[in-house]
Image (cartoon, grey):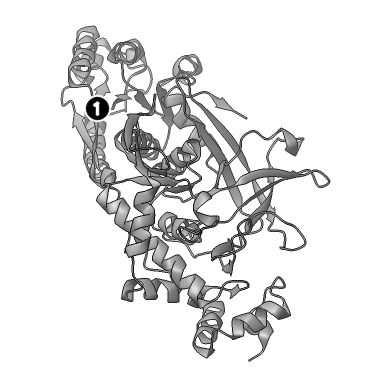
Amino acid sequence: MDTKERFPNPELTRRSLLKAAALGTAVAGMATKAVAASDKPVWDLADAPAPPVRSKAARVKVAFVYPPTSQLDKEGYYSWPGSGFDAEGRQKQYTEQLRALGKELNVELDILEQNIADDAGAAAFADSVKAAKPEAVLLILFKKGHWPQLKKVVEDAGVPAVVVAPLGILLVDMINELRLNPGVYLINSEGAMEGIATGLRMVRAAYWMKNSRLMDLAPEKADDKQLPVIGTTLHTVPLERFYEAYKRTTRDDAVQKLGRAYLGNAKGLVEPNEDDVMEAARCYFAMRELIEAEKADALTMTCLPGLQHPHKHVPPCMSFMTLRDQGFPAGCQSDLNSALTLMLVEYLYDRPGFMQNASMDTESNLYFGAHCTCPAYMGGRGSKPEPYILRSHAEAGWGCVPRVLLKEGQRVTMALYQSREKPEMIVYAGEIVRCPEIPPVGGCRTNALIRFDGVQDACTVKGMHQIVFYGDYAEPLRDFCQLYGIPVVT
């Protein structure tokens, strides 16, 4: 077999080729197949730990704001949207679409049948919101002159408000009254239903964050505490529990199947041997055991001490890769902010993220991020996985971790939620330039040089362990932050 065909990446040296060949012809055959069919699933994405929070439905109260058309007929003047706008018919149409959308997104919509037509109706609806305490209100305006009633509900209800006006109802001064207000997401658009879906996803994500259980595998004793503002429960589980789970996890059929998938779909392997790969698969199932036992919706872990002598577990980087690919947020080094950001990105956009150490190439003025774990399905579970190479952990020098080859030219967003009494969100948008080869560069195994929009000096980029994810989501993420009163910094 031609070695260039089997291991086409120039990082794979003659020494590593000889080492890889020792794994045998079966593994070699699997690796060759993967190069030719890299669009096949790397592992079974359906076989995933189901975050319990995803079954919960956020509650949203919905009201339409407009006067009866019969009243406008008597007055003889319709103003915007005009005499041909059938408000009652539009309410019926929207209601049908909203019920279907609520079912699709698992959001419970309590739709007020009677439209809000006057001040008394606005006050009564605001009072009902205060009593019911939903996650948000959705207010749909069908008449320019009823803007004051809508604003009254927004001011009095005391919950985040998604405000909708089909194009041709509001004038610019009205739009600017609420467009940038914390606690409001304003949609003034021809395609209002698309905007409503975006708004409801934001509400759902915030609700899931508030009701999530983030397991932190850490040296500290067992503990639970609710995080400020975002409301997530931080559930600390002693690391010893993970050590014990790892010890009792055997190389059963499930472990061997996953290990073969790691090997069979890799573009190549350098330092690890087959035993290293199987141990990485074993580590994943030890994590699964704790996830299910603790009913966790996400996890983070103090992972580095266990890699030092004596080895208490293998590098968990393949486990983090697989969990994120399956839609389960999993963060490194017990970094709370990074784990929360992974959760938020997954809940908002169904995207896994690449948590990385921040550095910069000062000569090319590019951001450089690197870490020893990264999802393969960076585009989400319906996407084609990115190719990866199996390497040792860069800093520990042993085990098996992925070097995921991120796509050159891919648009990305980078974010970091900073949890505190007054939280902030770091947000950047940019483009992957390339993934530098190892060697000559050092650092962690998955890496990327990124050019961020509007950043003149790469060394001014803020944050550490920020989350990079595929897609242009900087503006939608800013919208989420506005709806929940989180300042954005760049």
Q: Position of residue 401 (x, y in %)?
A: 55, 63
Relative placement, left or right, of 106 versus 442 is left
- Which residue lies most toward the front here? 310
Report the quarter where the C terminus lies.
top right
Helix, strand or loop for disc 1:
strand
Asked whether 458 or 410 is in front, the reply is 458
Asked whether 163 or 316 is in front, the reply is 316
Q: Which residue is mark 1?
A: 62
Quadrant assignment, res 62: top left
Q: Position of residue 416 (x, y in %)?
A: 53, 36
Asked whether 319 or 396 is in front, the reply is 396
Is residue 328 visible in the rendered image? The answer is yes
Q: Position of residue 230 (x, y in %)?
A: 38, 29
Q: Position of residue 171 (x, y in %)?
A: 47, 18
Report the quarter where the N terminus lies.
bottom right
**Residue drawn 40% across and 36% down?**
195
**Residue drawn 22% across and 19% down?**
129
Q: Residues within 10 Å of mark 1 (few under 14, many from 20)?
A: many
Is residue 46 visible in the rendered image? The answer is no
Going by the numbered disc 1, the residue's amino acid type is Val
From the viewer's perspective, is residue 176 above or below residue 256? above
